[in-house]
Image (cartoon, helix red, strand yellow):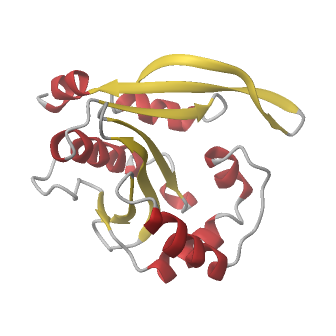
Amino acid sequence: MSSSLFEGQLVRLSSDDPQVMAEAFARWNQNSEYFRLLDSDPAHLWSANKFKEWLEKDLDSALPNNLAFSIQTVDNDKLIGFVAFDGINWTDRDSYVAIGIGEPDFWGKGFGSDAMRLMLRYGFSELNLHRVSLNVYAYNLRGIRSYEKCGFKHEGVIREFVLRDGQRSDMLQMGILRSEWDKLDQK
């Protein structure tokens, strides 16, 4: 792995112009498969202007407890997704992490895993977090494999949490501790 804090083998994390991210989110959310992997809300379409308003107003007001980055490819600087710590608890030193790869051409090729490893390294080495957690729908097999590769452990199940196409699916809870990350990081 690169010695750069925000650059991995396939991706780099960066801060992007809210207009650029808003346009990407508006485009990505038109893909129902992407949206259904990311959110339990009913699918909805927001304009780029609505996303920009949300990014500038709601996300900025959540600092320093939420930290978000764009995911861009190392080879051609293409914006392909986002990764964020959501609700950092500075007292207990834990946070939830969320990730979305919005460009389908980059699914299942290691880009999300590379971005997650960067985010974990940032969280544990820079923010001094003790624990990072995430939730994932049981039907997101590609995401589950990626999280397991990054060292996340299965910790719980919320049964029949989400309704998709008339079928109920579980939501899995996963987490990784700093001590587990330290062991993986030294390999």
Q: Is residue 81 left or right of residue 187?
A: right
Q: Please give the name of the residue rendered at 53% of the width and 72% of the height, measured from the top-left corner.
A: 57
- Along the line of sight, the residue nearer the viewer: 42 or 145: 42
Q: Please give the name of the residue rendered at 41% of the width and 26% of the height, measured from the top-left corner.
A: 175
The reply to whether residue 139 is visible in this rendering is yes
Residue with the most extreme right position: 166
Q: Please give the name of the residue rendered at 47% of the width and 49% of the height, measured from the top-left corner.
A: 99
Which percent across, then down, holds residue 103?
Answer: 54, 62
Which percent across, then down, holds residue 133?
Answer: 43, 32
Q: Is residue 23 left or right of residue 85?
A: right
The reply to whether residue 152 is visible in this rendering is no
Q: Write down the quadrant of residue 4 in the picture.
A: bottom left
Residue with the most extreme front position: 91
Q: Is residue 154 left or right of residue 157?
A: left
Vertical arrangement, residue 60 with respect to residue 90, above or below = below
Which percent across, then down, holds residue 106?
Answer: 48, 57
Vertical arrangement, residue 72 with respect to residue 156, above or below = below
- Could you tell me which quadrant the C terminus lies in? top left
Q: Write down the quadrant of residue 63 in the picture.
A: bottom left
Which percent across, then down, holds residue 43?
Answer: 78, 56
- Along the line of sight, the residue nearer the viewer: 18 or 88: 88
- Along the line of sight, the residue nearer the viewer: 73 or 182: 182
Number of labels in the image equals 0
